[in-house]
Image (tube, coloured by chain):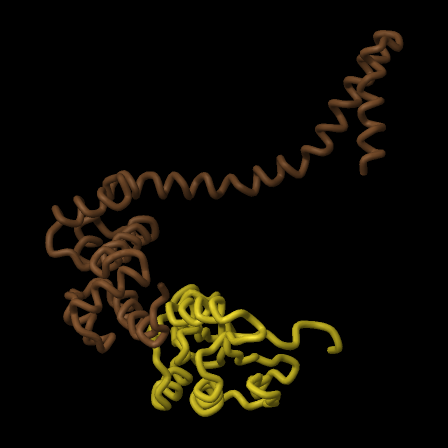
Chain colours: A yellow, B brown
Amino acid sequence: MSQGVEVVGLYVRDQEEALKFYVDQVGFKVHTDVRNGDYRWLTVQHPEQPSFQLGLFTPQAPMVDSTTAQALKELVAKGAMPPLVLVVDDCRASYDRMRASGVEFTQEPVARFGSVDAGFRDPSGNGWKLIEARR
Amino acid sequence: MGQDPELLRRLLRAKDRMDAASDEDWPVPRLARESGVSAAHFARSFKEAFGVPPHRYLLTRRIERAKAMLRETELSVTEIAFETGWQSLGTFGRIFRDITGDSPGAIRERERAGGGEMERIPACFLRAAHRPDLKIAVSEKRRQEADGQDGSIEGGAPDGAAASQQEDL
């Protein structure tokens, strides 16, 4: 595949914290981690999805002004960012594994609509649905 | 004017807990513990962050859940009231009416009737999809009528309008 969406970014409150969360607790791996002064381009990747990167960015100058950065940090912390979905083969097994590694779950696995789903948040407040792939 | 993001994140945790178990009792001290702040600080900060006091938020979530159950299940209103966390049917009915403006029974009837409306949407799409054809048919009909009137000025006007519209495009 040569065309398509390659990077989608999340706003996080702390890139180091987000990196530990997505790599050590969720199970992603680092794709790119490059610094330029205060700016850090950091993307992670699902081990089974090499064509897609999840960017972990802090709202900061000079990308946004400081008032906007503060507003964005507040919105993320209030859980107001759009939904994220992580598809897994076995929702309950992933739930057990991630919960044991310290992931904050907002909803235990529930069987409905012919699948099983759970909910978790990253340390910044971004909300994820963990959904079992339909077989 | 803004709030500390660290505090907001902890308030969100209490909100998540209410979302996950809205049928449970959530007195402010319990919520404050979830957020790791004092009860007085919690109530004030929560309202500032999410626009409604925590108890009001909880009631709203319960009513949302009750509405979904009225729509999607065959449980009685009484069963739904207790299932969604109310101790008395009277309180449930009063707060339900307060929030939705209607009684649980009336909402159940309307939501189900609404389901019928939803089923008609594809037919509406179908009708919308056929409108262009209908327009052409009408204009043709008009033209035919105009032709029938033997090239009157009125007959020429629609064609002129159509031509100028095409130029605009």
Query: Which residue occupies 36% across, 43% down?
Result: B111
Q: Is residue B37 left or right of residue B2?
A: left
Question: Which residue appears at 52% of the width and 87% of the height?
Answer: A28
Residue A42 visible here: no
* Picture quadrant where residue B163 is located: top right
Residue at far right of view: B151
The percent coordinates of residue B152 (x first, y second) are 85, 8
Point 25% across, 75% down: residue:
B35
Which quadrant, please, contains the N terminus of chain A? bottom right
B81 in relation to B19, above or below:
above
Report the front residue among B137 and B43: B43
Query: Above or below — where is A23 with respect to B64?
Result: below
Q: Is residue B20 visible?
A: yes
Position of residue A43 in the picture relative to residue B155 (left or right)? left
What number of labels is visible?
0
Depth check, front residue: B74 or A15: A15
Q: Position of residue A49 (x, y in %)?
A: 60, 83
Quadrant of residue A107 within the rendered picture: bottom left
**Residue at the spot x=30%, y=43% of the render?**
B108
Q: Where A125 sits versus B155, above or below? A: below
Q: Quadrant of residue A48?
A: bottom right
Question: Percent from the top left, x then y, of residue A97?
Answer: 39, 88
